[in-house]
C-alpha cells in the first residue's frame, strides 16, 4: 500500500529548560542489521491502531528490524482507575518485560470526571482536574522510564475535528499531557489528522490512515542514530541527560 502523502507531525518545543531547542526534534537513524529493536505500544485503542497498522505490514517491520510488542488495550485511560488502573498494570505485570522504544497514545477515554473518594468527583477540565491528571501522566512516564522503556515517544491527541466533545477539550488535554510528559520523554508529537482520516465516530482512524501513521512511526524509528551503535549503553542515555535530538523526516510545525 503506497503512501500517497506524507503524514504531518507537529513538533513541540520545551520553553522552560532549553527554550530554543526542540524537546524532540524528530527521530533517529538506521536500524542495526544485526539486532532487532523492540517497540511497544502503550495506551488505548488509538495506540492499538498504531500497533495494528505496523503488525499488518510485516514486510515493513522486517525491513526495519523491529520486534513489535502490544501493551496497549482498548477502553483504558488515566482518569477511571476504578475501572482499570493502567499505570499499575504497566508497573506490576512482570510478564511484560522491557522495550527499546515505547509509543504512547492515550487520552480519548480520559475526558470524564475523576473520582477522589466515595461519591466525590473532580469535574473534567477544571484546574483541580488538570492537576490530578497531570500527576497521573507524570506517574505513567516514570513507570515507563524506570521499568519498561529505553526511550518514550509520546503522541498527543489528534484534533478530532468531527467529534464535538473531544475537539472542544483537545487543546486543554494536550497542554496537560505535554506539561506532564515533556520533562522525561524523548520526544512528543501531535498527529495532524484531517476529518477524512476518521471513521464515523470521529475518534478512531480509518484503516488507510492507520497504515500511514504506522509507516511514519517506522520511518522515524529507522532513522534514529542511537540505535546504530553496537554498545547498548549508548542507546539508553543516563538519567538526567538532555532529551535526544531527533531529526524530523516529515512535515513539522511549531505550536
Image (cartoon, helix red, strand yellow):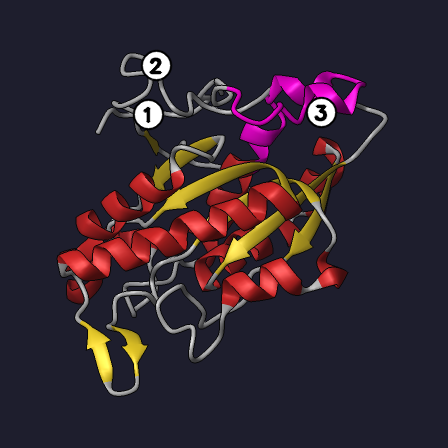
Name the mark nearer the viewer: 1 or 2.
2
Give the residue at mark 1: 252
Determine contact: label 1, label 2, CB under 8 Å: no
Residue 9 position (above or below residue 254)? below
Residue 100 position (above or below residue 176)? above
Label 2 crowd (10 A; few <14 / some 14-19 / many >=20): some
Query: Residue 251 at x, y = what percent?
Result: 35, 25
Residue at the (58%, 57%) spot, across then down: 52
Residue 63 position (above or below residue 129)? above
Horizontal placement of 6 versus 96: left or right?
A: left
Name the mark nearer the viewer: 3 or 2.
2
In the image, residue 236 lies in the stretch drawn in magenta: yes
> Of the numbered discs in the image, which one, if any, rests on residue 31?
3
In front: 60, or 240?
Answer: 240
Query: Which image quarter: residue 239?
Result: top right
Residue furthest to the right in view is: 34
Query: Residue 184 at x, y = what percent?
Result: 46, 34
Determine contact: label 3, label 1, CB under 8 Å: no
> Of the numbered discs in the image, which one, if any, rests on residue 21?
2
Q: How far, Cα to Cα, is label 3 from label 2? A: 25 Å
Which stretch appears magenta? 218-241
Residue at the (51%, 66%) spot, across then down: 86
Q: How far, Cα to Cα, is label 3 from label 1? A: 23 Å
Residue at the (49%, 30%) spot, across then down: 186
Query: Residue 68 at x, y = what percent?
Result: 69, 48
In the image, residue 149 lies in the stretch drawn in magenta: no
Label 3 crowd (10 A; few <14 / some 14-19 / many >=20): many
Horizontal placement of 220 versus 108: left or right?
A: right
Q: Earlier in the sequence, mark 3 or mark 1?
A: 3
Q: Earlier in the sequence, mark 3 or mark 2?
A: 2
Amino acid at each position: 500500500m503506497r503512501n500517497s502523502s506524507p503524514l504531518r507531525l507537529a513538533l513541540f518545543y520545551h520553553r522552560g529548560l532549553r527554550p530554543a531547542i526542540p524537546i524532540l526534534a524528530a527521530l533517529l537513524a538506521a536500524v542495526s542489521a544485526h539486532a532487532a529493536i523492540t517497540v511497544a505500544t502503550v495506551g488505548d485503542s488509538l495506540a492499538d491502531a498504531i500497533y495494528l497498522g505496523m503488525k499488518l505490514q510485516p514486510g515493513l517491520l522486517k525491513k526495519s528490524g523491529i520486534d513489535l510488542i502490544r501493551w496497549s488495550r482498548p477502553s483504558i485511560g488515566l482518569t477511571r482507575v476504578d475501572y482499570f488502573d493502567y499505570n499499575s498494570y504497566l508497573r506490576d505485570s512482570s510478564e511484560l518485560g522491557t522495550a527499546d522504544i515505547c509509543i504512547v497514545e492515550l487520552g480519548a477515554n480520559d475526558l470524564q470526571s475523576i473520582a477522589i473518594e466515595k461519591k466525590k468527583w473532580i469535574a473534567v477540565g477544571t484546574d483541580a482536574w488538570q492537576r490530578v491528571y497531570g500527576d497521573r501522566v507524570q506517574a505513567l512516564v516514570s513507570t515507563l522510564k524506570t521499568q519498561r522503556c529505553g526511550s518514550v515517544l509520546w503522541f498527543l491527541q489528534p484534533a478530532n475535528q468531527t467529534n464535538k466533545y473531544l475537539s472542544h477539550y483537545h487543546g486543554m488535554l494536550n497542554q496537560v499531557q505535554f506539561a506532564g510528559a515533556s520533562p522525561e520523554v524523548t520526544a512528543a508529537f501531535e498527529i495532524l489528522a484531517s476529518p477524512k482520516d476518521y471513521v464515523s465516530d470521529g475518534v478512531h482512524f480509518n484503516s488507510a490512515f492507520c497504515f500511514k501513521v504506522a509507516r511514519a512511526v517506522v520511518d522515524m524509528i529507522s532513522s534514529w542514530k542511537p540505535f546504530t551503535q553496537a554498545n547498548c549503553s549508548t542507546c539508553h542515555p543516563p538519567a538526567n541527560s538532555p532529551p535526544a535530538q531527533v531529526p524530523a523526516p516529515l512535515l513539522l510545525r511549531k505550536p
